[in-house]
Image (tube, grey):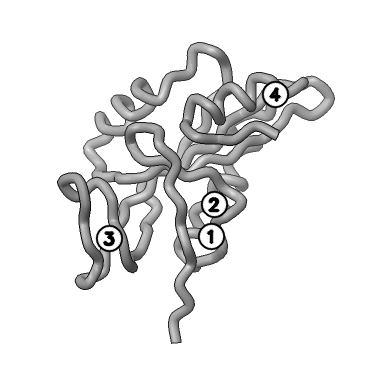
C-alpha cells in the first residue's frame, strides 16, 4: 500500500496501475467561518468553513502531467480557488474513458461538495500539491 503524501505520489500510484487512468479534477474555493484561524498567510484554515466547487476538468494521467501546469492553467481562468479534489476513472477493456464519459462523475463530485457529503473517498490537495484533510461538520 502506497502512502499518498503529495499530488506527485498520487500521480505515480496511478501510473503504476495496469490500465490507463483519467484524472477527475475539481477546483474548490475554501470560505472560512469567522471563527476559523489562518496560518502561513492564509494558506491553511483551521476550524470551520465551507467549500464551493469552482471548476471541473479531466486529464489523461501520463508521466508528463504536472501540478504546476494544472495550477497555471486554472489560474488563467481568472477564478479564485484554494484546493483541488481528485478522483480517477480506470480504463474499461483497455480503453481510456473519454471526457464525455467523465462528465457525470465530475458532476457527482461537485454535488457531493455542495451537499456537504463525506469527501473521504477523494484525494484533496492544496495548490502546492500537499494533501489536505477535510472533516465534515454536522450542522444542527
According to the image, label 4 marks what residue?
A: 96
N-terminal of the two: label 4 or label 3?
Answer: 3
Label 3 or label 2, whichever lies nearer to me, is 3
Which of the 4 image quadrants contains residue 30?
bottom left
- Measure the C-alpha gap from mark 2 to mark 1: 5 Å
Nearest to viewer (mark 4 / mark 3): 3
Residue under label 1: 112
Which circle marks residue 99 in the picture?
A: none
Choose between 17 and 5: the one closer to the eye. Answer: 5
**Quadrant where the N terminus lies?**
top right
108 up-or-down from 47: above or below: above
Q: Local crowd at mark 4 within 10 Å, few (<14), some, or many (≥20)?
A: some
Q: Secondary structure at mark 2?
A: helix
Relative horizontal placement of residue 67, taking residue 89 as reference (left or right)? left
The span from disc 4 to disc 3 (Cα, nearest Å) is 35 Å
Which residue occupies 74% across, 27% down? 91
Amino acid at each position: 500500500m502506497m502512502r499518498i503524501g503529495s499530488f506527485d505520489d498520487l500521480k505515480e500510484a496511478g501510473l503504476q496501475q495496469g490500465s490507463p487512468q483519467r484524472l477527475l479534477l475539481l477546483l474548490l474555493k475554501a470560505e472560512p467561518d469567522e471563527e476559523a484561524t489562518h496560518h502561513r498567510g492564509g494558506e491553511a484554515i483551521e476550524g470551520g468553513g465551507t467549500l464551493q466547487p469552482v471548476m471541473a476538468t479531466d486529464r489523461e494521467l501520463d508521466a508528463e502531467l504536472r501540478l504546476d501546469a494544472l495550477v497555471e492553467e486554472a489560474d488563467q481562468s481568472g477564478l479564485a480557488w484554494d484546493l483541488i479534489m481528485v478522483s480517477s476513472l480506470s480504463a474499461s477493456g483497455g480503453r481510456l474513458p473519454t471526457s464525455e464519459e467523465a462528465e457525470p462523475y465530475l458532476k457527482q463530485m461537485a454535488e457531493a461538495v455542495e451537499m456537504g457529503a463525506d469527501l473521504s473517498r477523494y484525494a484533496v490537495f492544496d495548490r502546492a500539491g500537499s494533501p489536505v484533510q477535510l472533516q465534515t461538520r454536522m450542522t444542527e
